Structure formats: C-alpha cells, structure tokens
Amino acid sequence: MTTSTRTRVLDRIDLAILDVLQKNGRISNVNLAKEVNLSPSPCLDRVKKLESEGYIEGYSARLNSAKLGQALVAHVEITLKSSTEAVFSVFREHIVKIPQVVSCDMVAGGFDYLVTIRVADMVQYREVLGKIVETPGVSTNHTYMVIEHIKIDSGLTVL
Amino acid sequence: MTTSTRTRVLDRIDLAILDVLQKNGRISNVNLAKEVNLSPSPCLDRVKKLESEGYIEGYSARLNSAKLGQALVAHVEITLKSSTEAVFSVFREHIVKIPQVVSCDMVAGGFDYLVTIRVADMVQYREVLGKIVETPGVSTNHTYMVIEHIKIDSGLTVL
DNA sequence: TGTCATGCAGCATTTAATTCTGTTTATGAG
DNA sequence: CTCATAAACAGAATTAAATGCTGCATGACA
C-alpha cells in the first residue's frame, strides 16, 4: 500500500475543508471553521489530520509568472533512443534538475515524455532546450510554444 | 498597460518573501520575517503590498490528487476546423466550463490546443473527451495518457 | 441498558497578527 | 555641506487567532 492509497472515507465536512483551503490556503482557522459550520477546535483537528494523512501535501502562494518575468511557456515532446529502464532513469535524473521544467510526464503514444518549461524569453528557451536535448538517450524533440493560456486551474473538483 | 506588466523593481527581500511563500504558503508572518531577516511589521507590509500589486495572486492548499480519486491524467491535442477567431472563441467558452480540464493552452505548431485533463478513471475520461470533441469547431484530437509523473513543480524560480 | 469511543463546543492559555510610535537611513534641494 | 523630506525599519502595545483542555452529546456495541 502506497501513500497514495485512499485510506478512509472523507465526510462532507472534510471535503468542504479541502475545497475551501484549495481556494484560499491562507484563511484563518477561525474563518475556515465558520465556512464549514464547525467550531475552531474540531476544525483545526480535521485540518491537522488531513495534513498528516497526506490529503493536503502543503500550501503555496500562487505567483504571477508574467509579472515576475517568466512569461514564455513551451511544451516539448521528447522521444528517447530506446525504451529501456536504464535510459528512462538517466532522463528522469537529468530533467528534474532543470529548474525551468514545470512538469514532466511519461506518456503512452507517439513519444515518450511531455515536458513543460517556463522561461523568461527565447534566449533562455534555447538554453533550457539545449540542456534537455543534451541529456543522454534523447533522440528527437518537438516544441509547441504556448500562444495563449486559456485555463490554468490545478484545483481538484472535491465537492 | 495590463496587470501583468512589471511595475516596479522587487528587491532581494521581496524576492525572498515570494520564494518562501511559494514553498510554504501558510507560514506565520513571524516566522516569515525571521526567514527574510526582518521584523514582523515591515515584513507584513511587504506581503500586503505584493498581494495588492498582483505579484501574489492567492494561496492554495496542494491536494493529493491520487488520494482524492483523481489519478488519471491525459494530454489531449486538439485541432479545430478553421483558425478563425470565431471558432477559437466558441472553443474557449466551452472548454473553461469543464471542471476536469486542468489546463488549456493555444499553441503554435501542428495542432491548435493542448488540453490537460484529470479524471478518476477511464469511464470519466471518455465522458470528458466526449464533451471536448463535441465542442463546435473541433476537428481532430489525439490523447496521450500519462503513465508516470516525473515532476510537477509549478513554482517559479524567483531567486 | 450500560459502557466505550468519537466528535463536538466552549473556555483558558499561548502565540501570532496588526497597529502605532519613534528612530534610522537614504534622497534631494538649497 | 547641511537641512528637509520620505521611506523603511524595530519595538511595544493591543487585538485576534491558534492551540490545548475539559466536559457533554451522540452513536456503536456488547
């Protein structure tokens, strides 16, 4: 059993807590308690439990990437030279060390990995792409530059 | 000038605050102040300012999607029947209403949109894909199922 | 029906957030 | 070079929240 296994049934109040905290991670416990119709102490107990059980992995400030000079996003499809675990392993180790890599998924289909990167400009894009393609085992790559973000919503539909 | 325009130069302390809050969005102001070597009051002033100026867009709890029964992620490439603004507009309006759509980017290259969806299982995948391909103007689609998440890190490299 | 476990509210204590005041520091004008 | 001004800071005081504790209510189960 891994940590990702659902270990108990969350009730309506737990789900409401998750929903509120997902939308407003910095709400005070007093106000969170009001939102879910509970007094502060059992509310805090539940939050602590959801944290310790791994339903809540942490809290983050959402930063405005454009204002911070990281406006360029690109999706890069990567194909490796062979589909052996050794090659995958090397690729994984290299890719996670590149800070501009936002996400990297192994996929089933016409290529092996879909890598999303966020950079300041084309100069930096070239640098990062260079790092990626120089990774041992990489065969081919194809970039799709993002022209417009229609939706970014990492929130889960919890209710 | 849009809200995404950088309107002032952030100093080292501001960037440090953003970096800390991105990693730990629920840290107390007292501890945040210690992290960035400031006393609580000017630290709080800076955080409020970063929020009101839009550098910080909000705070979120990071939820464990697997434990919450949303373990299946797929990337779907969408091509529209024509590249007119009218068709794009209809597509955008439909896609943002589907809660399982995590992100949707218009891209430059071989197709028009890259849509990422998160669902509980294959049954739900079919439902969501159905909604997407029934959107007026959609011509072709191709799905890449995610086999393994190597990295998910929406964090910006701020320092 | 009695006992136990669970979850809750309310209160008390500790800790943090917030506001206010005075001081330092950087900046620019005379 | 000196004074005026504004910005940013530290520290104290006040307000609010987090946290821990106690007892009550509810439901499960023997």
Image (cartoon, coloured by chain):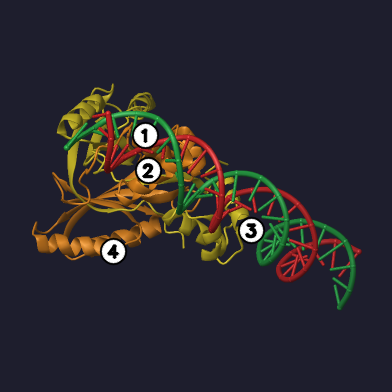
Chain colours: A orange, B yellow, C red, D green
Q: Secondary structure at mark 1?
A: helix
Disc marking residue A13: 1
Q: Earlier in the sequence, mark 1 or mark 4?
A: 1
Q: Secondary structure at mark 4?
A: helix
Q: Residues within 10 Å of mark 1 (few under 14, many from 20)?
A: some
How far is mark 3 from mark 4, CA to CA?
40 Å
Disc marking residue B42: 3
How far is mark 4 from mark 2, CA to CA?
44 Å
Is residue A110 in sight in this rendering? Answer: yes
**A29 relative position to B83: left or right:** right
How far is mark 1 from mark 4, CA to CA?
46 Å
Q: Are marks 2 and 1 in contact (CB under 8 Å)?
A: yes
Amino acid under label 4? Lys
Give the labeled residue for mark 2.
A46
Q: Residue at x 56, y 61 (%)?
A: B33
Give the labeled residue for mark 4.
A131
- Label 3 is found on which chain of the structure? B
Q: Residues within 10 Å of mark 4 (few under 14, many from 20)?
A: few
